[in-house]
Image: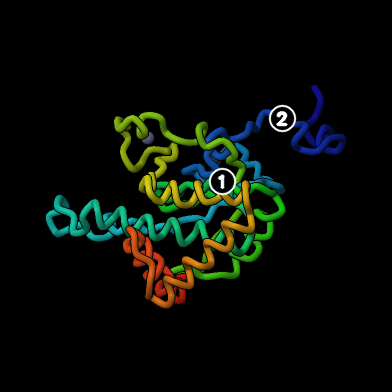
Amino acid sequence: MVELGFLFSLYPAALVFPCRVNCSFYFKIGACRHGDRCSRLHNKPTFSQTIALLNIYRNPQNSSQSADGLRCAVSDVEMQEHYDEFFEEVFTEMEEKYGEVEEMNVCDNLGDHLVGNVYVKFRREEDAEKAVIDLNNRWFNGQPIHAELSPVTDFREACCRQYEMGECTRGGFCNFMHLKPISRELRRELYGRRRKKHRSRSRSRERRSRSRDRGRGGGGGGGGGGRERDRRRSRDRERSGRF
Ligand SMILES: [Zn+2]
Ligand SMILES: [Zn+2]
């Protein structure tokens, strides 16, 4: 029989023990409940289009349960508005600072390794790399940001299909992503705007900066833009303190 010590002297450990398999949770979801103690391999990517901002979204409904634990002090409408504002703020910041965002997703899970995780998939890997380096030196809502490159590229593989059908029995502690949907209007605004930008870059940039000026100045602009304007204004106000 060959001695193990002799084998190690010839080959690296990875060749002697090739059976340490990749953790499929880390590979698909970018997070595993065992963290660094996982017996399987968490193969951290050195290049990726996707970054993960860990535990950054705080759902106000989770922190404001009333004493009986049943009634929630924050209504669904308020929660959705708060969420849309958060989503728009982060999405816009990513595009303005680092580069075009292909897709952004936020986890509504409750387990420690997934709660409040935000995944931003950039169009270019270089932008993702730049974002991770910069974001790890920044703060959000009074907390230091923890950002890392994520192996997730296909969110359909990462997310929980039962949750999307409204029937996940594991609830918030499910180990697949429960992706919190943004409102239809915001989806149209963020992703639609980008599609237009592709078609005519200069025109849409002009329109965007004009609408922002109007938001700051507070004047003018009728015809259904009121809600939109208010939201922008509150975002501008908030931004100074949050990021
Ligand atoms: Zn694992
Ligand atoms: Zn689930």
Between the residue at mark 1 and the residue at mark 2, the CA separation in whole angstroms equals 46 Å
> Which label belongs to residue 195?
1
Q: Is residue 45 visible?
A: yes
For the N terminus, the image quarter is: top right
Few, some or many residues within 10 Å of mark 1 (<14, 14–19, 20+): few
Residue 147 pos. (x, y %): 57, 58
Residue 152 pos. (x, y %): 58, 41
Disc 1 element: helix
Residue 102 pos. (x, y %): 58, 46
Does residue 237 appear left or right of residue 118 in this picture?
Answer: left
Q: Determine contact: label 1, label 2, CB under 8 Å.
A: no
- How many labels sit on residues? 2
User: On the image, which quarter does residue 165 sit in?
Assistant: top left
Question: Residue at 37% across / 45% down in the picture?
Answer: 184
Mark 1 or 2, nearer chain start: 2
The kind of residue on which mark 1 rests is: Arg
Residue marked by disc 2: 18
Question: Residue at 57% across / 57% down in the picture?
Answer: 204
Does residue 146 appear left or right of residue 233 in this picture?
Answer: right
Question: Residue at 46% across / 35% down in the picture?
Answer: 159
Residue 58 pos. (x, y %): 37, 58
